[in-house]
Amino acid sequence: MPHAQRAAAAVTDFSHIRGTTVRGRGGSSFDQSGTKQTWHQERVHMKTCVKLILAAATATVVLGAAASTASARRIEVSEQRFHQVWTSITFVGEFASVKCPMTIEGSFHSKTTSKVIGQLIGYITRVTLIGGACTSGHATALTEILPWHITYEGFGGILPRITEIHILLIGAAFRFELLGGSCLVQTSTTEPSEDWIFIEPNTGQVRNLFPNPNRLIRTSAGCLAGATGRFEGTSEVFAGGQESGTTRITVRLVQ
């Protein structure tokens, strides 16, 4: 048999040996039935492992960021100074009510505030109430005892998204003329005015504020002493003083 024929026969003879691998084009391995050998399966397995590792790493980063935000201990505001515009704020007593337009100004002690209930976080420093514009009576804000105190009372929403901040207003004082008498109404640590600040969940912007209607405040002597009343109404909240316009304050959680 010529040498070339013997070489070809030798290659052909190898193909019937069990477990023998013959290399094809491109380095692919084939067994005797012509299918790809184990190395290809291992390559597919390796790709799968890499994908799983990347997915796990991504999930770890996302969960870590969420946990960090959820455990954030402080609230940050974009502006310390603020003003509130009440088209009308109403003191609703047991037998009468007075409704008046009012603007107040104040500031937070810091741009960042710890979520500690009872903590003093700011002051009301200016109150503008035009008694002559009231309906069903007359009212005066007792500005000589400013500043009024603002304390932190809690928040609403599901972390990491806050939709409300609850504050208490302590020391706020008004004198109302109604039913032929003069009524002094003053908030205190035992009978504060609780206000809810509402935050737009998608942007973090503070939209408005309104009093908790379940907080009752006792009136003083000279106006059905011992009777109770509450504040009602909704105010718009803006950054800076009254001269600052209508820029909104934004709120977010920080570590």
Image (tube, rainbow, N blue to C red):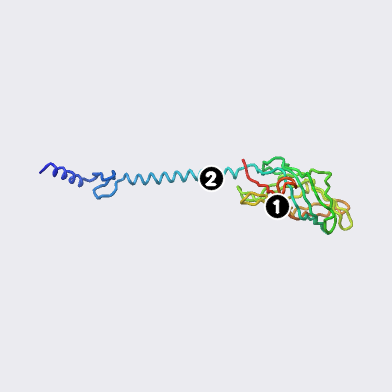
Q: Quadrant of the C terminus?
A: top right
- Checking the image for residue 208, the label placed there is 1
The image shows residue 160 at horizontal and vertical percentages of 60, 47
The image shows residue 79 at horizontal and vertical percentages of 69, 43
The image shows residue 45 at horizontal and vertical percentages of 37, 46
- Checking the image for residue 157, the label placed there is none
The residue at 68%/52% (across/down) is 207
Q: Are marks 1 and 2 in contact (CB under 8 Å)?
A: no
Residue 193 relative to residue 222: left or right: left
The image shows residue 18 at horizontal and vertical percentages of 22, 46
10 Å crowding of disc 2: few (<14), some (14-19), many (20+): few
Q: Say which element carries label 2.
A: helix
The residue at 70%/52% (across/down) is 208
What residue is shown with label 2?
63
Q: Say which element carries label 1.
A: strand
Q: Is residue 92 above or below residue 122?
A: below
Nearer the observer, 104 or 66: 104
Query: Along the polypeptide, which appears first: circle 1 or circle 2?
Result: 2
Q: Is residue 4 above or below residue 180?
A: above
Amino acid type at circle 2 is: Leu
Q: Is residue 61 above or below residue 202?
A: above
Amino acid type at circle 1 is: Asn
Q: State how many labels appear.
A: 2
